[in-house]
Amino acid sequence: TRVRNDRESAAVVGAMPACDALGVLEARAETLVTQHESASDKAQHALASESKILLKDLLREVQKLENDGLLDHPNASHSERARGLYLRGRLLEAVGGVGDVVVAGEAGEDTASPGGHLKKSHSDDELKTHNLDGAEQLLKKAAKLDPSLDGAWLTLAQLLWKKGDLEGAKNCYDAVLHKKPTNVAVHKKTLCQLSMLSRTLAKSNAKPGTEAQKRFVADSVLFAKAAVKLDLNDGYSWYQVGTAYMSAFFAQGATDKSKLLQALKAYDCAEKGGPLGTLVAINGDGNGNGTNKGTGDTHGFGDQGDTSATGGTKNVHNSALTNRNGDHGIHKSGSPGGGIGDHPDLHFNRAVVSRYVEHFGEALCGFAKAQALDKNLPTQTEVDAVLAALGKLHDACAGVGASFKQKKLVGIKSALREDTGETTENADGRTKTDGKTKNVPVVLTHENRQFSCVELLSLTEGVNQNVALRCRAVIDATAGASGTTGGGENNTEGALNLHYVVVDKNGGLCAVSVYGLEDGALRLSATLTLLEPDLRNVDVTYRGKRYEFKLIRVDSPRQILVAGKAPVGRIARPRLATALM
C-alpha cells in the first residue's frame, strides 16, 4: 500500500510546476520529521520506526524527481534553489545511514561507485558518514544561497552536533539567534537547543569547577529562560529551565538546594504547560543574580550544566537530562506549546531531583511513571538505589544491628558528654552537683556566632535557627559502604551525597545526609557538630513496606564541624555526568 501511495504521490508531484512541487514536498517533510522526533521523545518506538520508513521513501522520491529534472527550472531564484538543497539535506540528516539511500556525488567529487552510491560492501557506519557528509554539503550550500533560511541553519547545527563539532553547531544557532526574530517558534527552538548545547559544552569543553564551565552552565540557564519568556505556556521550554537548574546544582558541587527546588517548579510547569501558581523567576543567571541581558547577549555571566543524568551503576547524578536522542534530548523539532506530561524523560529527571531533596516517595512515583512510558530507561537501578538507602536508614534509626548494642552506645554517649564538659552519667544528660541535678546550658561560638547545643528531641521540623546538635556517627550508610567501618573510599567513590546514622548524648538516633563532602571526610570516632540542622520526618510506604525515620540534611561543609573544626581537604569536586546529559 505504501509503495502504491508513493507512486501515486510522485506522479501527482511530477505533474506540478517545480515551485509548487517543492512546497508540497516541504510540507510532507515537515510533518514526517516532526512526527518522527515527537514519537522518539515519547518512546513510541513503533510510530518512530514507521515515520522513519516514510522519511526514507520520501527521500527516494525527492531524489528521483530531482534526477528527472522535475524539481528545478532554469529561472529558479536563489531562494528556491536553497529550499531544494535544504529539503534534500534535511531528509538525509533525518534518515542517517540507510543502505539504499545515499547522496549522489556532486560534479568533480570522488565517489565509491558510479552516481555517487557507496558499494554494498560498505558498513552501516560508512553509509551513515557518507550520508551525513552529503547532507552537510547540501545544507551549507542552502544557507550560503539564502542566509535567511533558518531551517537550513538549524538542521546544519543538529548535524554538526551529531558529528561532534560543538563549536560549529553553536555558530549555526548563533546565526539564527542574532537575526531579528520573525518567527517566535523558530527563535524559541533555537534558544532551547542552545541551552542544551551549552550543557554539553560545559561537560566536553571545560574542566570541572573552572570559570569556563561556570559560564557555559550560566548560559544554559539564561537561554532556557529566554525561551520561556517567548511562550510561558510551552512545556518544553520549561523543561529546559528545569534541566538547566538541575545541571547547575550538580556542577557547582551539589551544595545549593535552591537549584533543585527551582528545577522542581520548572518541571511542574513543563508537565502542565505553564506556571502553577508561583512562577519561577526568569530574570537571573542561575546563581541568584538578576540580569537585563537580551536573548542574544548571553555570555560572560558568573556561574554555571543532561541531559542529566545518572552515573551508571554507582547511581551518581552529576548533571541533568536523560537522553535517547543523541545529544539533543527531547523535542528536537521544538514544541508547539502546552504540557509534555507524556514525555518519560521529564518524569525521570524530576524523580532524580526529588531523590536529592529527600522526597523519596515522589522520587519512587516519578520513576514508576517514567518506566510506564519507556521501559528502556534505567529506572530499576534508580529505584533499587532509593530503596537500599531507605532500608539502611530505617533499620539503623530503629536501632537494628550490632552497631547499636547498649554497651557500645553507652561509651559513645559518655564521650559526647565529655566533649560538652558534662561529667554526669545520668541517662537524661544532666549534671549532678552536691547531690542535686541541674540543667547545664551549653553555648557554642563559631565564626562570631553563638549556637545553643541541644539534643535531638528538641529539634523541630525544618531549619533550626541558632541551634547546634552534637552527635557521633554510628554507621556509614552511604551506598556501597560496608557495615560500621565506613566502607572505604573505594566502595563509595563517586557518591553524590553521604548517608550516616548518628546518635546524640541521650541515645537518640537520626539519619544525616551530607552534601559537598567526599567520602572519608567524616570519621566515625569524631564528634560531629551540626549547625542549624535542617530536620524532616521521612515516612514512605512502598509496596507494603513502610520506611520511617528522622533525617537531617547538611547542604554545605560550612554546616558541619568535625571534632570542633571545619572539614578540610575533602570538599567535593564539581562534576558533570559523562554518560547522560
Image: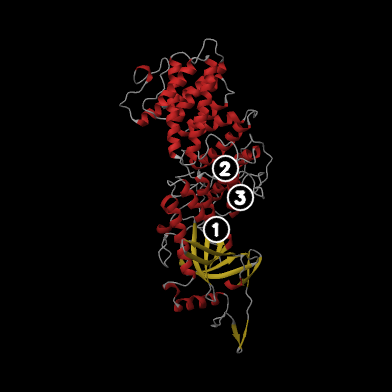
Q: Earlier in the sequence, mark 3 or mark 1?
A: 3
Within-10-Å neighbours for mark 3: few <14, some 14–19, many 20+: many
Question: Which residue occupies 57% across, 42% down?
Answer: 240
Q: Which labelled disc corresponds to residue 359? A: 1
Residue 524 visible (yes or no): no
SS under mark 2: helix
Q: Amino acid at mark 1?
A: His
Q: Amino acid at mark 3?
A: Lys
The answer to which image quadrant residue 163 occupies is top left
SS under mark 3: helix
Q: Quadrant of the N terminus?
A: top left
Question: Which residue occupies 69% across, 40% down?
Answer: 292
Q: Earlier in the sequence, mark 2 or mark 1?
A: 2
Q: Could you say where residue 185 lies in the image, as x and y percent from the top left? A: 61, 33
Q: Which labelled disc corresponds to residue 240? A: 2
317 relative position to 279: left or right? left
Circles 2 and 3, Cβ within 8 Å, touching? The answer is no
Q: Earlier in the sequence, mark 2 or mark 3?
A: 2
Question: Which residue occupies 46% across, 29% down?
Answer: 93
In front of the other: 379 or 317: 379
Give the residue pinned by disc 3.
Answer: 265
CA gap, disc 2 to disc 1?
A: 22 Å
